[in-house]
Image (cartoon, rainbow, N blue to C red):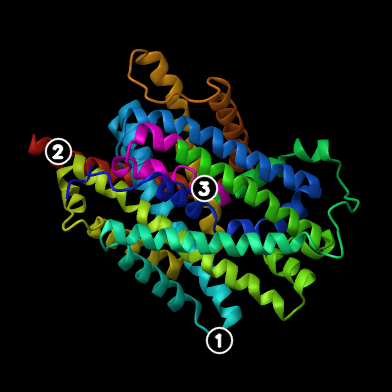
Amino acid sequence: MSVKEQRIGLFTASNLIVASMVGTGVFTTSGFLVADIRSKTAVLVAWVVGGILALFGGLAYAELGAAFPGNGGEYQLLSRIYHPVVGFLAGWTSLVIGFSAPIAAYGIGFAKYLGQLFPGLPEKPVAIALVVLMSLIHSLKVETSTKWQDALTYGKLALIIVFCGAGLLSAEHFIGEPMPVALGEATLSGAFATGLIWISFSYSGWNAASYIAGELKDPAKNLPRAVILGTLSVTVLYTWLNWVFLDAAPAAEIAGKVEVAHIAARHLFGDAASKMIAVVIALGLLSTTGAMIMTGPRVLEAMGTDYPRLGAFAERSGGRGPVKAIVVQGTLAVVFVVTASFDALVNTVGFVLSLWCLLTVLGVFVMRLREPTLARPYKTLGYPITPALFIALSVWMIGHQVLEKPVIAAYGAGAVATGLLLYVWAKQGTARSG
């Protein structure tokens, strides 16, 4: 099968974005945000800002993806905009930190929530089993794997909407309780900026469609539609869901707690019924893990197309996905499951992905100046304001992260350094083949 054969439609692309975005972060982040920002209203504002940021970034990606339709996301876009080495580094860190690490984090989260339903389950073996199972599913024919992905996404969304609807019927409401920090002060604080890094992890996945643009039917139309439909849907869902969390329980009870969803469910349904949230999250993690396993290998596949020494990862047969690339990603994810903690994975992922997304959105300005006559089937809505706002907010977030958690920047720098060595090795193979 040709990698460029277009098999993926608008609804699957939109579902892929939704499935990639809705993971553990939305169920675990707001407790920490309440503790740090100390304003429930500001926490809700942060979730809305995160959604707007994701949408603005997605609109810029849609322009670039429609102009250069191909698999690989930032890898192929940054290679074209700046230099092949920039794209290669983005591709490498995306594979390792952008996909393999989150897959591991989602696997660990899945095991934790499944353990609440079936106490005594060993976490790491369950997480590894999930990675292996979803990798096998996405090694099947593309049509088969997309049907599985669509079904999991619909099931996840249905359960979340039921939970949100139940929140409207609560007898107690805590959303308006007095908080120690005023809204204006809270939204201008460093804690708000750092919180957006965590929220950006929860929203990560808005660029998922760009990784499979080469297999998307009519990418010029369907890529921007998928970005807008998927991102707006998740923004509404996230804001509604976190309103339920913050309204269901007092701030003192959820501040600093990872299990904020369980605390809210206990207030809404009682101790016994609160286990339903574990079902919602576990199902959601199946969908999210599958989405990342579907999109991530397309990066290594695209790199294999351009670099002969990595050529084995570009091979496909019988309408199947890029099996060898899926195996590599799955192996890396298993290593992360065994060796890394959930918190370390989340912080590193959010920081590194923010950097590459910043460079990619900046690429809209670069290409408009350098190649003004380039055919652009879609142009960024709200240009130049929307991409400029994305860049400004990203710089603000990244700057605070570097100042407050420099060790995270060191992890990212280590991944980039490893990618440079791999690039030199892969580039030598290209020179010889030429």
Cα–Cα gap, marks 3 and 2: 33 Å
Q: Which residue is mark 2?
A: 430
Instruction: Please indicate whether residue 31 sits to the left or right of residue 364 in the image.
Output: right
Depth check: give the residue in front, 129 or 163: 163
Q: Which residues are magenta?
A: 202-224
Q: Which residue is mark 3?
A: 204
Q: Which residue is mark 1?
A: 120
Cα–Cα gap, marks 2 and 1: 51 Å
Crowd band around label 1 with a 10 angstrom C-alpha radius: few (<14), some (14–19), many (20+): few
Marks 3 and 2, the one that precedes in the sequence: 3
> What predominant SS class does the magenta segment belong to?
helix
Q: Is residue 363 above or below residue 328?
A: above
The residue drawn where x is 41% and y is 55% is 292
The residue drawn where x is 55% and y is 32% is 56
Quarter of the image that includes the C terminus: top left
| Amino acid under disc 1 | Gly
Q: From the top left corner, tell me how far across and down residue 101 is, in percent.
A: 44, 58
Crowd band around label 3 with a 10 angstrom C-alpha radius: few (<14), some (14–19), many (20+): many
| Amino acid under disc 2 | Thr
Marks 1 and 3, the one that precedes in the sequence: 1
Residue 340 shows up from this direction: no
Closer to the camera: disc 3 or disc 2? Answer: 3
Instruction: Please indicate whether residue 324 sits to the left or right of residue 34 in the image.
Output: left
Q: Is residue 103 above or below residue 41?
A: below
Queried whether the magenta region covers residue 166, the answer comes back as no
Instruction: Please indicate whether residue 227 sits to the left or right of residue 37 in the image.
Output: left
Q: From the top left corner, tell me how far across and down residue 231 is, in percent.
A: 54, 43
Queried whether the magenta region covers residue 206, the answer comes back as yes
Task: Name the image quarter holding residue 71.
Answer: top left
Q: Is residue 344 above or below residue 366?
A: below
User: Which element is circle 1 on?
Assistant: loop
Q: From the top left corner, tell me how far across and down residue 31 is, in percent.
A: 72, 58
